[in-house]
Structure formats: structure tokens, C-alpha cells
Amino acid sequence: MNVQWASGLLLLIALYATLGLCFGLPFVWRGVGRIDPQAEQGSWGFRWMILPGVVALWPLLAWRWWHRRPPPTAWTAHQRGDKGGTAE
Amino acid sequence: MSHAYRAVGWNRQKRLYDLATGLGVVLFLGFFVGGGLWRYPDATVETLLIRGLGTAAILLLHVILSIGPLCRLDQRFLPLLYNRRHLGVTFFLLALAHGAFSIVQFHALGDTNPLVSVLTSNGRFDSVSGFPFQPLGLAALVIFFLMAATSHDFWLANLTAPVWKALHMMVYVAYGLVLLHVALGALQSETAPFYGWLLGLGAVWVFGLQIVAGWRESRLDRGRSEALDSEGFLEVCSVAEIPDARARIVCLAEERVAVFRYGDKISAVSNVCQHQNGPLGEGRVVDGCIVCPWHGFQYDPATGTSPPPFTEKIPTFRVRVSSGRVWVHPQANPAGTRVEPAIVAEATGEAGV
């Protein structure tokens, strides 16, 4: 990788992380309780703990906060089956 | 579970686990650096610390990767699994310290941005000794960061367990990158083949354990009869094959079902815990609830629901006992649906739904 490409890549990552931090601080303060009821009364230790992940995955959480989406349901093969799929 | 999130749900076992981990790391680093200074008086503390942190990290990574398959092979390893996430975060911090010290030591003294220097300093893809091994380590560190940053239960709930697990399965990609990082980096300056053999042995151990555990589970999945009755129930085992307060795991409808016997009752639920997809069938029934062997999540065997105030639900299955044999309907009920347990008649082993 040449210096120009490396500098460009690091600049993009820095920009993404800066936007993530700008989003992340109000999100862990207010937004997280809007998308997950268990986070509404969450401790400050918990809020700081999730901040690095929020900075990394901020587009997903911004979309969820904007649309006020609750936590999704995890689907197993059995749960897909009881929604009309065939069993065996 | 369903309550307000905290940073860490501390209990005695977690404190002991973390204390043992911390002590182990400090002692290892002390011996590595102290022993290194004694054996190689010309070596600098910085260099020994970089090597010690890297060695501690890769050793811990092997331990972490071994815990899952070892638990599948022998339940006595389960206490190690209980707090594996803390072990993972400890490993990440060691790897991060190794990376940070290396960048300061080898890349911060020039006039180029240190991170740019990491990405551009070695560029000979056609040479083993000149291969850019540092970007391989950096790429692995990025994956480990994502895993450590998403280790809280908040992420499990908000990414869903299957997505979270898929993200965390990237540890094997990162492990491969770490092997290359070490083989093309530190090992190139070693004259003795011992460390190369050790690295190879570690890889054979990790992948060998996974293969053995997977082979054993697939054998268990296949080892049942295919007898279906007129109502679509499938014969899975005899009542006597299920120890009291334990389960027999069978594979139905693409996923495992845990058939529990508790006293004179038999119930069948999905084997997949809502928390981290832990194997419920390897847990036991305590005080009337199935307890997941991984993190202690509880479910009523008849309804598949966690006791209040918790709200987790898993699918249940219709079950019946006839002539001492257990039959399960492979069609899952919606998560949380109550199914009356089959009752085992004591004298004859006969029972109804």
C-alpha cells in the first residue's frame, strides 16, 4: 500500500469515528433508552461501556433511533417453523 | 435478562474469575520480562514488554478458543465458559497494548504518521521476511476491537443472538491473521524452529478440538430413529435414557430440541437459549426451571418462558410417552406456548400426554 492510499484510508476511518463519537454521546445519554427499554434505567457504567461499539456501529443505531425501532426478535429455525415453515 | 442494564453484573464467581485472570496476566508478564532481562541482559524492557504482551495475548487467545469445544466435549469445563467475555476483553487489552507499544517503539520516531508507517513500511509481498506482517496484526486487532466493543448483553439484544454470534465467529478470521502476523513477523528473527513448531501445534490444537467436538455433535444428531406415528410424532428415546432433572438432545426441524425429564414429567423445548444461543439441553432443572449451563438463564419447561420479571421465551414442543418411549412432535409451537408435560407412570413407565 502506498502512502497516499494509506493516508486516505486512515482519513476516512478518522472521519467515520468522529461522526460516530458525535452521534454516540447523545445516543448513550438519551437515544439508547428510546430503542431499548432495558437501557432506559441503565447505569452510567453501562452507557460508557457501550460507547466504543456505538462509535463503530453508529449508522445502524442512528437508523433504529430515527425509526424508534425496538430490539429485533432473534429467529431460530424452530421459530421460523412455527410461522408457517415446514418441520422436517 | 430483562432488567436495567449495568456495566457488569458482578457476583462472587465473576470476581474470582477476574482476579485469577488478572493475577495470571501480571505474573506471566513479570516472569517474561524478568526472565528475559536475566537471560538477555542486552535486551531493553520495551522490547521484552512488547514481546511479553504479544505472547500473553496469543496464549490467552488459544485458551479462549479452546473453552467452547472443551465444554462441548466435557461439562467439567463449563465454569471456564461462564465469564469468557471478560477473558476476551482482557485478551483484547493485551493485544491493544502490544500494538500500541509496537507502534510507539518502531513507527513513532520518524516524520511519517505512525499508522501510515505501519501500513506502508513493509511492502514486499514476494518475500517471506519482507512481507507486510504488521497490517495483518492491525486487521486482526480491528476484528478483536469489534468483538470486545460488542461484548455487552445490550449488543446481543440489539443485534440478535444469531447476528452477534456471526460477528463473533470472525474470531477465526482474526486468529488466522494472528498466525500469519507471528509467522511472518516475530518468527522471522528466530533461529530455533521451536517457536514455529509451538505456533503450529497451537493451530492444530484449536482446529482439532473444533473438528472433534463438531464430529461428536453431528454423530449425536444422527443417532436417533426416524419412526413417525400417524399423528406426526417422532420417537426420540426411551424414558430411561433421560436422567432425572436432565435432558436428552435430539435434532428436529433443522435445530436441536432438549427433552427434559423432571420427576415424573417430561417436556420438550428448543435447545437454543435466547441469551447467547447456549445449549439448554446441557443444563439441568433446578427448582422447577431449566437453567442454561452458560450464563444461568432460566425457563419453565412447560411454557418455555423465563420466570417474572424476565421476559425471554423459547419454542416448546408437544411430547408424549408410550410404552416407555418418548415421542416429540417436530413442529415447534410459538415461543412461550404452554404444553402440558407428559406424565411418566412410575410402575410401568407408561404415560399419556
Image (cartoon, rainbow, N blue to C red):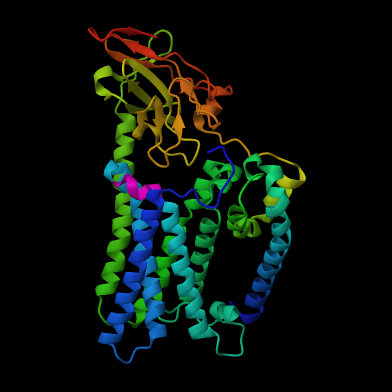
What residue is at 53 percent from the left and 23 percent from the top?
B336
Check residue B65 for magenta coloring: no
With respect to residue B331, does B270 lie above or below? below
- Residue A49, image x, y percentages: 58, 57
With respect to residue B140, does A83 lie above or below? above
- Residue farthest right in this picture: A66
- Residue farthest left in this picture: B347
- Left or right: residue B134 versus residue B66 is right
- Residue farthest front in this picture: B12
Where on the picture, by quarter, is residue B43? Answer: bottom left
Q: Nearer the viewer, residue B240 or B132?
A: B240
The majority secondary structure of the magenta stretch comes to helix
Q: Nearer the viewer, residue B20 or B128?
A: B20
Report the magenta residues as a range: B77-83
Q: For residue B123, say whether it is visible.
A: no
What residue is at 39 percent from the left and 79 percent from the top?
B49
Q: Nearer the viewer, residue B113 or B304?
A: B304
- Residue B300, image x, y percentages: 45, 25
